[in-house]
Amino acid sequence: MAGGRLTTHVLDTMHGKPARGMRLELHFVHGDHTHHLLDSYTNGDGRVDQPLLEEEFQHGEYEIRFHVGQYFERLGVEIETPFLDVVPIRFIIAEDRHYHVPLLVSPFAYSTYRGS
């Protein structure tokens, strides 16, 4: 389906900056299982260099898995009792539009919304 694309942006709220080098995975959801579409890493601006979906864009249910625990560990953040590891954000694409899924994250909390 032409005209749509999917992007993301990750902000590290603990340090007040974009989350550079965070691994993420994109999955297409089929009922009770998922199909892996891609792995990527965020750049210095906390974004992925290319849209997660553009040419392969289609309606359906998707999940982005953000590897938050690995990111904070790599930064040397010492947490006595780790809380977040992989943060899955599951959402539905139902229109041929730009879908933007930002993640604001710290080692203990996260939020997201449908961005523009």
Image (cartoon, rainbow, N blue to C red):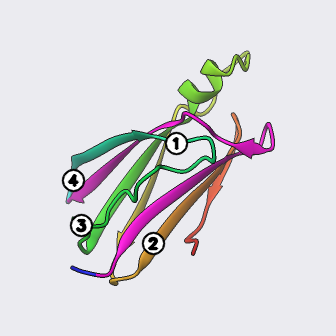
**In the picture shown, does residue 69 fall above or below 28?**
above
**In terms of sequence position, does the residue under pointer 4 or pointer 2 come before the other?**
4
- Residue tagged 1: 42
Asked whether 35 or 74 is in front, the reply is: 74
Cα–Cα gap, marks 4 and 2: 23 Å
Q: Nearer the viewer, mark 1 or mark 4?
A: 1
Which span of residues is magenta-colored? 3-30
**In terms of sequence position, does the residue under pointer 2 or pointer 1 come before the other?**
1
- What residue sits 20% from the left and 59% below the top? 31
In the structure shown, which secondary structural element does the residue marked by tag 4 occupy? Answer: loop
**Amino acid on which disc 1 is placed:** Thr
**Amino acid on which disc 3 is placed:** Glu
- Residue tagged 2: 99
- What residue sits 37% from the left and 54% below the top? 63
Q: Would residue 23 be found to the left or right of residue 113 on screen?
A: left
Asked whether 76 or 32 is in front, the reply is: 76
> Is 114 within the magenta?
no
Image quadrant holding the N terminus, namely bottom left
> Is 9 within the magenta?
yes
Cα–Cα gap, marks 3 and 4: 25 Å
- Residue tagged 4: 32
Q: Nearer the viewer, mark 2 or mark 1?
A: 1
Image quadrant holding the C terminus, namely bottom right
- What residue sits 71% from the left and 39% below the top? 106
**In terms of sequence position, does the residue under pointer 3 or pointer 4 come before the other?**
4
